[in-house]
Image (cartoon, rainbow, N blue to C red):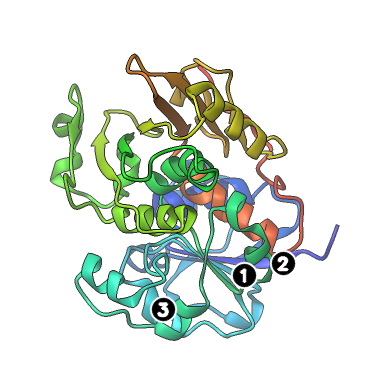
């Protein structure tokens, strides 16, 4: 093992910040050096999240009060569009894993189109590495700044990118129906997320223009070697956490639905966290709850030459904080599963 590093979590009072802390507390090479939460500055983490009662942790402070001298790596779990200015002030010797959307897109024009304002940290954006670990670990290992992917994009790109790279599916016929638990919307109080607004219902949102579309198209286009525009619709499910992407594709060339499953099995055979289930299986979100795992499966469609590909993750873990820690492990040259060994919590 190597020397313990000092880690700061910016935005520790949100769901992803708390999830980072939950895993980092059992990480053998990490010491928590700073926790920030501007609105809750001065409070303890236990006051923000009672599950941390009795654990010796730094008090929550504002970002302006962080002593960077004692920090080696930063997890930035701040809201989208707030990270750019903050990270410009982080000393260049410090490694960064950013969980917001601020550095995920490589094209500044695409960022401005999807987020409605010009990017405020172009130098950092140019050095950022988009971090789905299983596809970019060589670049992540050399990176100073990793842009942690979105939950929907992780769940959708994991099964689709290998199929595009293999030339096994039609890039012009990809339809993604994805569903997320309510924690994906964050912890801030919103009328639309009240219990009575989401309970006993299931609905689509961001229809036709969800921001994750930009991430999907960038990843898919790179994998296919040409522009790809997929159909994507997110849905809100009345559960706390979990995500399921159901993806409809058309096989091309000699590919069959069974062959798609075999391509994915071969691609992920050596991966710790991505597991391909037997052909025809149906993965369930409850089986990966609380873990950094992704379960993928392929089923035959009743229409000839078409297949249904499914992927489940915990949106707060593999879709956010767990993958961020996985990326940290790669950046530091450690085993990828350090601190992340837990399997799903069921029932």
| As drawn, 72 above or below 77 | below
Q: Nearer the viewer, residue 137 or 1?
A: 137
| As drawn, 162 above or below 202 | below
Tell me the residue at 72%/64% (across/down).
332
- Secondary element under disc 1, as helix, strand or loop, is strand
Quickly name the residue at label 2: 5
Is residue 246 at least partly visible in the picture?
no
Tell me the residue at 49%/15% (across/down).
280
Q: Nearer the viewer, residue 273 or 86?
A: 273
Quickly name the residue at label 3: 86
Mark 2–mark 3 Cα distance, whole angstroms, equals 21 Å
Q: Position of residue 209 (x, y in %)?
A: 19, 52
| As drawn, 189 above or below 175 | below
Mark 1–mark 2 Cα distance, whole angstroms, equals 7 Å
Q: Position of residue 45 (x, y in %)?
A: 48, 54
- Secondary element under disc 3, as helix, strand or loop, is helix
Q: Are marks 3 and 1 in contact (CB under 8 Å)?
A: no
Quickly name the residue at label 1: 73
| As drawn, 227 above or below 89 | above
Q: Are marks 1 and 2 in contact (CB under 8 Å)?
A: yes
Q: Position of residue 330 (x, y in %)?
A: 69, 59
Mark with earlier residue (1, 2): 2
Q: Nearer the viewer, residue 101 or 240?
A: 101
């Amino acid at each position: 093992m190597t020397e313990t590093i000092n880690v700061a979590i910016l935005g520790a009072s949100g769901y992803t910040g708390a999830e980072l802390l939950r895993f980092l507390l059992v990480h053998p090479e990490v010491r928590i050096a700073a926790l920030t939460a501007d609105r809750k500055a001065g409070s303890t983490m236990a006051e923000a999240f009672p599950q941390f009662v009795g654990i010796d942790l730094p008090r929550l402070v504002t970002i302006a009060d962080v002593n960077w001298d004692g920090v080696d790596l930063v997890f930035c779990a701040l809201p989208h569009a707030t990270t750019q200015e903050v990270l410009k002030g982080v000393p260049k010797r410090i490694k960064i894993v950013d969980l917001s959307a601020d550095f995920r897109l490589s094209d500044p024009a695409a960022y401005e189109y999807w987020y409605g304002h010009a990017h405020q940290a172009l130098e950092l954006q140019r050095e950022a590495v988009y971090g789905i670990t299983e596809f970019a670990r060589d670049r992540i290992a050399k990176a100073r700044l990793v842009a942690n992917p979105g939950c929907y994009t992780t769940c959708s790109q994991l099964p689709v990118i290998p199929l595009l790279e293999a030339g096994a599916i039609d890039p012009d016929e990809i339809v993604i129906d994805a569903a997320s638990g309510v924690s994906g919307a964050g912890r801030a109080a919103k009328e639309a997320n009240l219990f009575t607004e989401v309970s006993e219902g299931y609905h689509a949102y961001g229809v036709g223009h969800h921001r994750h579309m930009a991430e999907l198209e960038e990843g898919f286009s790179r994998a296919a070697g040409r522009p790809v525009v997929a159909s994507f619709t997110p849905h809100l499910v009345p559960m706390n956490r979990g995500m399921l992407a159901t993806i409809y594709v058309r096989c091309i060339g000699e590919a069959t639905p069974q062959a798609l499953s075999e391509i994915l099995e071969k691609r992920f055979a050596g991966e710790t966290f991505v597991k391909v289930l037997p052909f025809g299986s149906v993965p369930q979100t409850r089986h990966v709850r609380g873990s950094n795992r992704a379960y993928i499966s392929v089923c035959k469609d009743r229409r000839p030459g078409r297949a249904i590909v499914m992927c489940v993750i915990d949106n707060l873990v593999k879709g956010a904080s767990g993958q961020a820690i996985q990326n940290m492990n790669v950046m530091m040259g450690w085993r990828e599963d350090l601190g992340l060994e837990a399997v799903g919590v069921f029932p």
